[in-house]
Image (cartoon, rainbow, N blue to C red):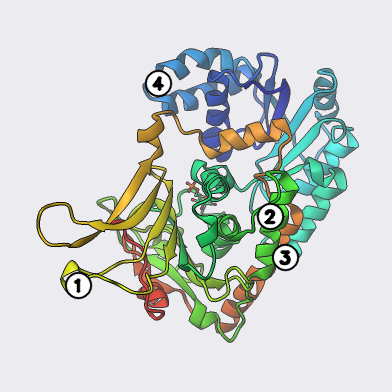
């Protein structure tokens, strides 16, 4: 369904996110006929260049990503014609008047400002947008993480953006919420009668959320080393996934109804204090090893600094203190340079109360619902069945397996494609409200403080392994193991 015509301004229009995610996403939406012809996309950055130069550079990058997708190749020239460029410096006045006039000349229509820049420019950009009267009407602003590095700095950013835009105009992106499987979790939980009666501490033993990456620092050393895995991944992506699993059914699929429920979960998370941080959390940092069959250096060598204590891996045990989840641990882990790129949520159900089978039938294993976010998006429900054949009754643990690509065979839209269109439509359901971001930080702050207090260096792990052995111990201590897809 096509959206209304819009103007989308990307601050940081020559940056990595714009070139790798936003513009390719927009090209897909355009090729699918969702972007009306009279829409425009304007890249903004400090360097001077013409519209033509910008189109050429973006065109080259997009073409490399398209591979042999003929349909996209065919649409590319027309898509590039929608692009324009404007050189602006958020800290100077030059060019802003003309930029504002150009946008206003389009009349009252949807205007999206995507702040794909360093957060320390958010205040200056928002001030300029307000000073030039670009914050009214159908204007929307999109901000990317990191939204602060603790609750105090997040509040400063939120205040600054909030001084130019109303909360209803602010879209805080967490791209994990745009992933197909995450939305499918809503469908699975709330469009089926099967799961809800079991979705609680009476029937669920524990939950695991894993976001494993094979990449290392990439080209983001400066950002990453001041952030670390807890701030970069857990505060946002993993906690958002936890909320989607743990929230109560919202009364309607309506933005505030969903966000109210997620907020309640964040506020119910049991604080991890200085006394239990050493028990409940594990920090790791990768050493030299191998990734995808190639030797890779350790974090400190990649960074070029021998003394960094930044964690590239976190595992932790969280608990949601409410009626539904009392006593059900949520084990979270994420890290760089792990053996494979895999993101999944595992709901591990309790054991049956009594087995009627003979010892020779083999063990009865607990049911598991595995939601795979990437790669190979899909859902697996692990069940016990009888081993087929004429022999005696032997039991087997097998998955009912639904791979989305196999079942539907269509291009799964990238998270950013969907989220950008949601911004244009003005639908904030999959975006974080200010209070959610701040509640997530309130839970993270004491963990950061406890780590600071402990002053421990992160535990080393070999690149290409599943993290420090302490992460295995974290779940094994409780008589459980990390899920393996076998
Ligand atoms: C980003 C983090 O938010 O998510 C990166 O800053 C991480 O460090 C990325 O690599 C992972 O996203 P995806 O969609 O590739 O799993």
Q: Which callout, 3 or 4, points at the residue further toward the start of the chain?
A: 4
Query: Circle 3 sits in a helix, a strand or a loop, which is it?
Result: helix
The quadrant in which the C terminus is found is: bottom left
Q: Quadrant of residue 216?
A: bottom left
Of residue 58 and residue 394, the one placed in the foreground of this image is 394
Task: Say which residue label 4 marks.
Answer: 69
Front disc: 4 or 1: 1
Q: CA distance from mark 4 to mark 1?
A: 55 Å
Q: Which callout, 1 or 3, points at the residue further toward the start of the chain?
A: 3
Task: Say which residue label 1 marks.
Answer: 358
Q: Position of residue 406 (x, y in %)?
A: 35, 34
Front disc: 2 or 4: 4
- Identify which residue is drawn at 50% across, 55% down: 195
- Identify which residue is drawn at 71% across, 43% down: 254
Query: Circle 1 sits in a helix, a strand or a loop, which is it?
Result: loop
Q: Is residue 182 left or right of residue 265?
A: left
Task: Say which residue label 3 marks.
Answer: 151
The quadrant in which the N terminus is found is: top right
Determine whether label 2 and label 1 are within 8 Å by CB: no
Q: Position of residue 389 (x, y in %)?
A: 12, 52
Query: Circle 4 sits in a helix, a strand or a loop, which is it?
Result: loop
């Amino acid at each position: 369904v096509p959206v209304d015509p819009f103007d989308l301004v990307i601050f940081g229009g020559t940056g990595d996110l714009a070139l790798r995610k936003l513009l390719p996403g927009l090209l897909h939406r355009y090729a699918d006929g969702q972007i009306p012809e009279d829409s425009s996309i304007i890249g903004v950055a400090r360097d001077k260049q013409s519209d033509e130069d910008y189109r050429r550079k973006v065109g080259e990058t997009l073409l490399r990503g398209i591979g042999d997708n003929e349909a996209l190749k065919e649409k590319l020239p027309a898509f590039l014609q929608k692009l324009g460029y404007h050189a602006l410096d958020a800290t100077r006045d030059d060019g802003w008047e003309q930029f504002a006039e150009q946008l206003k000349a389009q009349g009252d229509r949807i205007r999206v400002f995507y702040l794909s820049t360093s957060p320390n420019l958010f205040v200056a950009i928002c001030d300029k947008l307000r000073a030039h009267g670009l914050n009214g009407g159908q204007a929307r602003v999109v901000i990317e993480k990191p939204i602060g590095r603790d609750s105090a700095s997040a509040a400063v950013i939120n205040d600054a953006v909030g001084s130019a835009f109303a909360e209803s105009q602010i879209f805080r992106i967490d791209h994990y919420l745009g992933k197909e499987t995450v939305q499918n979790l809503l469908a699975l939980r709330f469009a089926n009668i099967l799961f809800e009666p079991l979705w609680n501490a009476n029937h669920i033993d524990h939950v695991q959320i894993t976001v494993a990456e094979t990449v290392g620092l990439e080209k983001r050393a400066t950002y990453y080393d001041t952030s670390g895995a807890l701030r970069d991944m857990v505060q946002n992506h993993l906690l958002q996934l936890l909320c989607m699993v743990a929230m109560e059914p919202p009364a309607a699929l309506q933005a505030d109804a969903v966000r109210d429920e997620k907020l309640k979960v964040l506020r119910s998370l049991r604080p991890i204090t200085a006394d239990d941080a050493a028990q409940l959390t594990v920090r790791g940092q990768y050493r030299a090893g191998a990734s995808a069959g190639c030797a890779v250096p350790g974090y400190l060598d990649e960074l070029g600094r021998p003394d960094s204590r930044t964690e590239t891996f976190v595992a932790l045990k969280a608990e949601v203190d409410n009626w539904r989840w009392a006593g059900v641990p949520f084990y979270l882990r994420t890290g760089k340079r792990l053996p494979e790129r895999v993101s999944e949520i595992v709901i591990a159900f309790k054991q049956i109360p009594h087995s009627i089978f003979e010892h020779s039938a083999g063990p009865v294993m607990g049911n598991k619902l595995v939601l795979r976010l990437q790669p190979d998006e899909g859902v697996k429900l692990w069940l016990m069945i009888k081993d087929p054949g004429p022999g005696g009754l032997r039991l087997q643990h097998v998955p009912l397996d639904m791979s989305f690509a196999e079942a539907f065979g269509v291009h799964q839209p990238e998270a950013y494609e969907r989220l950008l269109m949601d911004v244009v439509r003005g639908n904030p359901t999959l975006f974080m409200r200010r209070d959610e971001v701040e509640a997530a930080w309130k839970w993270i702050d004491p963990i950061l403080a406890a780590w600071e207090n402990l002053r421990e260096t992160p535990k080393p792990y070999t690149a290409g392994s599943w993290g420090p052995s302490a992460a295995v111990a974290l779940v094994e201590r409780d008589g459980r193991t990390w899920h393996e897809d076998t």
